[in-house]
Amino acid sequence: MTLVNDVLVSYPDAISPKEAAAYLAEEKEQWRAKGKELGKMILTLDGNEVVIQSSEKSPIKRIRRITGYLSESSNFNAAKQAELDARVIHS
């Protein structure tokens, strides 16, 4: 397996790196259209056909707590987002 653009990719020697990169770009776009992020792609050959097996990047999300509210920061309203931005790290 090789890490290409933050995606683990595996392909046989019969597929060139350039061809694998083209499959990767197309697959990443399809995942992005679904609102998901591609994590791993395995290319294999079945005769003259290329078989693509792919899986999603870990769906673990970071939850923040601002004044008692637990949520992803992308779901915060403007006031909560401002409160998050104003936080100071103390040493």
Image (cartoon, rainbow, N blue to C red):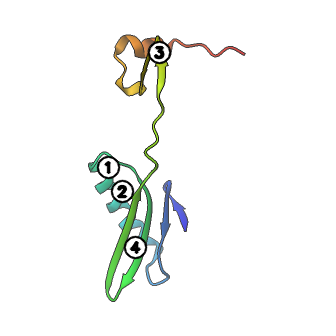
Q: Which residue is mark 3?
A: 66
Q: Nearer the viewer, residue 37 or 61?
A: 61
Secondary structure, mark 3, is: strand
Image side of residue 65 versus residue 53, left or right? right
User: x%, y% of residue 39?
Assistant: 45, 55
| C-alpha span from label 4 to label 1 | 20 Å
- Label 3 amino acid? Ile
Secondary structure, mark 4, is: helix
**Quarter where residue 23 is shown:** bottom left
Which of the two labelled residues, at mark 3 and mark 1, occupies the earlier sequence position? 1
- Label 4 amino acid? Glu
- Label 1 amino acid? Arg
Q: Which residue is mark 4?
A: 19
Q: At 48% across and 19% down in the image, what residue appears?
A: 65
User: x%, y% of residue 13?
Assistant: 50, 82
Which of the two labelled residues, at mark 2 and mark 3, occupies the earlier sequence position? 2
Which of the two labelled residues, at mark 4 and mark 3, occupies the earlier sequence position? 4
Q: Is residue 47 above or below residue 55?
A: below
The residue carrying pointer 2 sits among few (fewer than 14), some (14 to 19) or many (20 or more) residues within 10 Å by Cα, namely many
- Label 2 amino acid? Lys
Q: At 46% across and 13% down in the image, what residue appears?
A: 68
Q: Are marks 1 and 2 in contact (CB under 8 Å)?
A: yes
User: x%, y% of residue 63?
Assistant: 47, 28
Secondary structure, mark 1, is: helix
| C-alpha span from label 4 to label 2 | 14 Å
Q: Which residue is mark 1?
A: 32
